[in-house]
Amino acid sequence: LLDPTEAWTYTCQVMLNGTTTNTVSVSGDANGFTARDFAIATVVAYVAKFPDTGYPPRGINIIVGFGLMAGIIMLTLTSFTVLKKYNKKNNR
């Protein structure tokens, strides 16, 4: 028996592995009448996949990152050394 302002809410949580369809139905009797209704909801679920970017796995990225950083530092130091020698040679 429901009061005129009464409402019932049902919830359910589940881990989905794929598309699923839920169906709910309800019926009620009052004053010699029967009311029935239903609702259908389809949830489309798929497993997301990261795009293939061409980058190596994460652990290798750290090693490559340190290698690039060391290379940049070496190039910078070499550039300063060459400029210093050039400036000394040309009296600048």
Image (tube, helix red, strand yellow):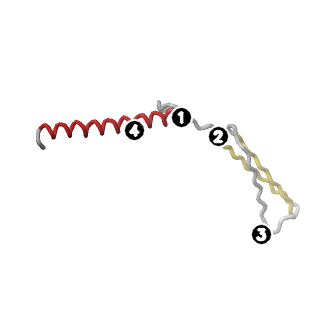
- Name the mark nearer the viewer: 1 or 2: 1
Q: Earlier in the sequence, mark 3 or mark 2?
A: 3
Numbered circle sitting on residue 5: 3
Q: Give residue 6's position: percent from left, percent from top.
A: 79, 67
Q: Give residue 88's position: percent from left, percent from top.
A: 15, 40
Q: Say what secondary structure mark 2 lies in.
A: loop
Amino acid under disc 1: Gly
Amino acid under disc 3: Thr
Residue at point 25%, 40% (across, down): 80
Q: Is residue 64 above or below residue 25?
A: above
When asked about the image quadrant of residue 65, the answer is: top left
Tell me how far mark 1 sits from mark 3, CA to CA. 60 Å
Contact, mark 4 vs mark 1 (Cβ under 8 Å) = no
Tell me how far mark 3 sits from mark 2, CA to CA. 35 Å
Q: Earlier in the sequence, mark 1 or mark 3?
A: 3
- Name the mark nearer the viewer: 4 or 1: 4
Q: Earlier in the sequence, mark 4 or mark 3?
A: 3
Q: Say what secondary structure mark 3 lies in.
A: loop
Residue at point 77%, 64% (across, down): 7
Question: Could you tell whether 51 is left or right of 45 in the image?
Answer: left
Q: Give residue 70's position: percent from left, percent from top.
A: 39, 36
When asked about the image quadrant of residue 82, the answer is: top left
Contact, mark 4 vs mark 3 (Cβ under 8 Å) = no
Tell me how far mark 4 sits from mark 1, CA to CA. 16 Å
Residue hosting label 1: 59
When asked about the image quadrant of residue 50, the answer is: top right
Residue hosting label 2: 45
Amino acid under disc 2: Ala
Quadrant where the C terminus is found in the figure: top left
Q: Say what secondary structure mark 4 lies in.
A: helix
Give 33 or 48, whichever is nearer the viewer.
48
Tell me how far mark 1 sits from mark 2, CA to CA. 31 Å
